[in-house]
Image (tube, helix red, strand yellow):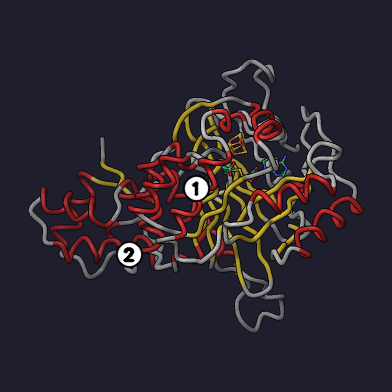
Amino acid sequence: MKQNLLDFDVQQLTAWFAEHGEKPFRAKQVLRWIYKAGESDFDAMSDLAVSLREKLKQIACVQAPKVMREELSDDGTRKWLLDMGTGNAVETVFIPEEGRGTLCVSTQAGCALDCAFCSTGKQGFSRNLSTAEIIGQLWWANHQLGKDAPSAGSGQAQGNWQISNVVLMGMGEPLLNFDHTVSALRLMLDDHAYGLSRRRVTVSTSGIVPAMDRLRDECPVALAVSLHAPNDKLRDELVPVNQKYPLKELLAACKRYLEKAPRDFITFEYVLLDGVNDSVQQAHELVRLVSDVPCKFNLIPFNPFPQAHYRRSKPEAIRRFRDVLMEADIVVTTRKTRGDDIAAACGQLAGLVQDKTKRTMQRPVALHD
Ligand code: SAH
Ligand code: SF4
């Protein structure tokens, strides 16, 4: 089998080149071709010796996941459904905004953590994605956006066709696929590959405490933590992994993370569920809970999916909840729901993962035909 070069971060690619008798600078040249030029054809890598190109053609390939379907939302959000083989698919979402373009990347097919309000969690866990499958989502999106961007002077709206930010908030728990996630992060950050700033790459976690410490030491990037409840009793129910890593430990890990983080705050994500976690009293409890962690809050109106038992909080409840946090001098953003006409909003990503739980009767969920 040919070696897929998307599976290597810079260090690994350099080591692999050395094993094949090639100098380190060759690895950097190839990286630039793959990630900066978006090239997958070795013959097109014109500054490599012909003999090296021939050798690479024999033993290597540059293979991003195959795209099964692309959907475009009325608001410009794009969603790609990527084939992961053996009945699995995951989703990648591009969200264009004024002055930036954010790609939301998946790290696992399904997720084992079974958060009560999450469509991905309802499917159970299928498998970890490889480094190639994670970084390949960027590679593909870049390729496609570059191809579709209106040419300057065409009279068409230019929109935003560049990926300036990456969030690991698609399907799966990134910190439970640690090694592949970190290799992919390194490629996002490396100047020979995508060269994104650490502040513009965000890992979102449900709170895998030991892995948060590892990430801090091995590859600190911006961190978002999915909180969703102001106390252990409710969080145990909504985010079951809380039973293993309760709030006290989680918040202590957040503080440790900030010692090395590229930003001086943690982003707490909080999905607002009608009548469950959205009262004014709970907002006050939340303020007390996070009082000694420098943080911002991202309030996410719940996005429904077919098997969901929850409802989105009323706009009035969202406003009241937000006001309590703001009165305590916490910076709060309420996430605009993007792409929900194509089920691309937070927590609606479902792909086509072979259902390991039988809860959804083997049918693809949350896909629109
Ligand atoms: N596993 C990681 C990252 C993927 S989920 C995590 O849990 O943080 C990305 C974000 O989407 C999380 O904050 C998650 O809680 C949120 N989310 C999940 N289901 C949702 C839904 N139905 N509506 C709104 N947000 C949801
Ligand atoms: Fe997994 Fe995140 Fe969904 Fe929880 S919210 S089930 S951790 S993907």
* In the foreground, 254 or 347: 254
Mark linked to residue 368: none
Mark linked to residue 252: 1
Which quadrant of the figure has residue 313? top right
In the picture as drawn, the residue positioned furthest to the bottom comes out as 153
Q: Is residue 173 above or below residue 354?
A: below
Q: Which residue is mark 2?
A: 33
All told, the count of numbered labels is 2
Side of 36 where 328 appears, left or right: right
* In the foreground, 180 or 140: 180
Q: Which dot, 1 or 2, sits closer to the camera?
A: 1
Side of 142 where 367 appears, left or right: right
Estimate the x, y position of residue 117 in percent, counting from the top left.
72, 34
Q: Residues within 10 Å of mark 1 (few under 14, many from 20)?
A: few
Which residue appears at 29% of the width and 49% of the height?
8
Estimate the x, y position of residue 121 in percent, counting from the top left.
62, 31
* In the foreground, 112 or 193: 112
Query: Distance of mark 1 from mark 2, alpha carbons?
Result: 42 Å
Which residue appears at 53% of the width and 26% of the height?
125
Side of 37 where 244 appears, left or right: right
Q: Is residue 88 above or below residue 258?
A: above
